[in-house]
Image (tube, rainbow, N blue to C red):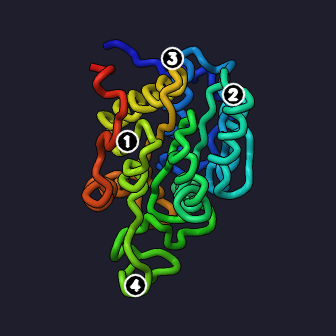
Amino acid sequence: MMKTVFERPTSLKSAPFRYCPGCGHSLIHRLIAESIDSLRIRERVIGIAPVGCAVFAYDYFDFDILEVAHGRPPAAATAMKRVLPDRIIFSYQGDGDLAAIGTAEIIHAAARGENITVFFINNATYGMTGGQMAPTTLLGQKTTTTPNGRDTGHSGYPLRVAEMLATVEGASFIARTAVDSPKNLLRTRALIEKAFRYQSEGKGFSLLEILSPCPTDWGLSPEESVKWIQSDMIPVFPLGVLKDRYAAEET
Ligand code: SF4
């Protein structure tokens, strides 16, 4: 029988991940690192870490990583890309960083058509601070601040970030994927590469929303968590490419 060997991507340090068992961040970090290796852009990449569970991204990625104030990665990415146009700049942001405190920054970066790549990790909760309601929390979902489940009368509706940004004229590529299955891991990897490639080709603003398990704050096992993504999250946040300005050139 052939033995499968998983080698560490060059763009990942050998440091063990400190994420909870079953957390999607570890998978997504690996997919980003593999994509950077595959595109041979490691020496040109600068990542921006969020305030959130991935705040220590610089401990894991083996290329330049900047830590900026909560919600401000798109503003910092804008500045870096304009000053260093040959660099590949990406931000890595969660629900709180991008969809709450950083809503203004992400919308205006998209409207300006900044030539940057954004990875938005949607786990429908505030992970680092203990599982409070996020803008992406589903209706009926129990969190520490919605113990009886999110209800529209008190907390409104979940924010669909990818759909919202797809309506922004300046955005070039907007897609949503998930890390709930081997098939979707491969699809996520391909979309990450495409988003980076678009930036290399000067095609403008790209955002990839990634549905990601948070077993700890969901109170589920890792296996139950990926099933919950499939049964509860994907119907609210459907997967697919929502906008691709250059789709005709790709076929
Ligand atoms: S709290 Fe959730 S998002 Fe944060 S590391 Fe644990 S599983 Fe991952």
Mark 1 highlights which residue? Answer: 175
Which quadrant of the rendered structure holds the N terminus?
top left
Distance between the alpha carbons at the discs numbered 2 and 3 = 14 Å
List x then y, in percent, for residue 202: 53, 24
Mark 3 highlights which residue? Answer: 38
In the rendered image, is residue 211 in sight? Answer: no
Which quadrant of the rendered structure holds the C terminus?
top left
Q: Residue at x 43, y 56 (%)?
A: 161
Q: Amino acid at mark 1?
A: Ala
Distance between the alpha carbons at the discs numbered 4 and 1 = 32 Å
Pointer 2 or 3: first along the chain: 3
Horizontally, residue 234 falls left or right of residue 174, namely left
Q: Amino acid at mark 2?
A: Asp
Horizontally, residue 53 falls left or right of residue 174, namely right
Pointer 3 or 1: first along the chain: 3
Tag 3 and tag 1, C-beta contact below 8 Å: no
